[in-house]
Amino acid sequence: KRHRMASRRKILLKIIVLGDSGVGKTSLLERYVENKFSLATKSTIGADFLSKHIEVKDQAVTLQIWDTAGQERFQGLGTTFYRGSDGAIFVFDVSRKDTFDALLQWKNSFLIQVGQEGNDDFPMLIIANKIDREDRAISNAMCAKFCQENNLEFVECSARDATNVNKAFEKITEKVIAHTKPEDIQYDNVKLNFDNEKPNEDCSC
């Protein structure tokens, strides 16, 4: 009886995380991928990515999650990092109204960069981060209204408390899979090395 898992191919998805500097993008990634949190996260320079292997609706997925520098806001510097993105997460800090006000510019700028200008069907998600803070400036209702007006969904998260972080990344993954045509799916090209298929390098014969 052949094991079903062995024959399954793993989908490779590139998710880019965008938003103003200091909203917690790196903290969200570290919480999600490594389940750790640090207040001493340095500002990201350029872009960096982390990978995570997950399963969504019985589909094996490798998520390549790109963490970008928030201070490059709306400049053309992001083009190379944006290219090939299957989905985008826009993050704001619920205690800083300016980071919320910047969301639409992030969204529009991103869509232009990836040649999807005005395409609200592209897989996107808003993360309202730092909901553990007591000095909240943007309420759930304000975020819901913004998302309704702009055809977006949002998840309230706390990287510090790990609230809804997994849920947010699973939601964007489901959106991407639902949006991608079967012929456009990219697979993770991990090759399995079977011992009987390669020469034994230790063999002195």
Image (cartoon, rainbow, N blue to C red):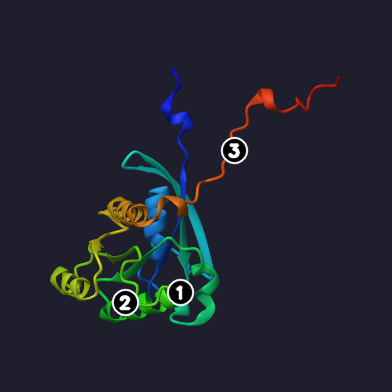
- Give me the C-alpha separation between circle 1 and circle 2: 18 Å
- Give me the C-alpha separation between circle 1 and circle 3: 32 Å
Q: Nearer the viewer, mark 1 or mark 3?
A: 1
Determine which of the numbered discs, if any, sits on residue 103 in the image: 2
Q: Residue at x 85, y 21 (%)?
A: 204
Residue ID for mark 1: 115
Quick one: label 2, few (<14), some, or many (20+) residues within 10 Å?
Answer: some
Name the foreground residue: 32 vs 79: 79
Residue ID for mark 3: 191
Name the foreground residue: 192 vs 44: 192
Name the foreground residue: 10 vs 101: 10
* Amino acid type indicated by mark 2: Leu
* Amino acid type indicated by mark 1: Gly
Labels 3 & 2 near each other (Cβ < 8 A) = no
User: Would residue 160 be visible to someone looking at this image?
Assistant: yes
Give the secondary structure at mark 1: loop
* Amino acid type indicated by mark 3: Lys
Q: Earlier in the sequence, mark 1 or mark 2?
A: 2
In the picture, measured across the screen, residue 178 lies left or right of residue 14, that is left
Quick one: label 3, few (<14), some, or many (20+) residues within 10 Å?
Answer: few
**In the rendered view of the protein, which quadrant contains the C terminus?**
top right
Q: Position of residue 7 (x, y in %)?
A: 48, 31
In the picture, measured across the screen, residue 97 lies left or right of residue 78, that is left
Labels 1 & 2 near each other (Cβ < 8 A) = no
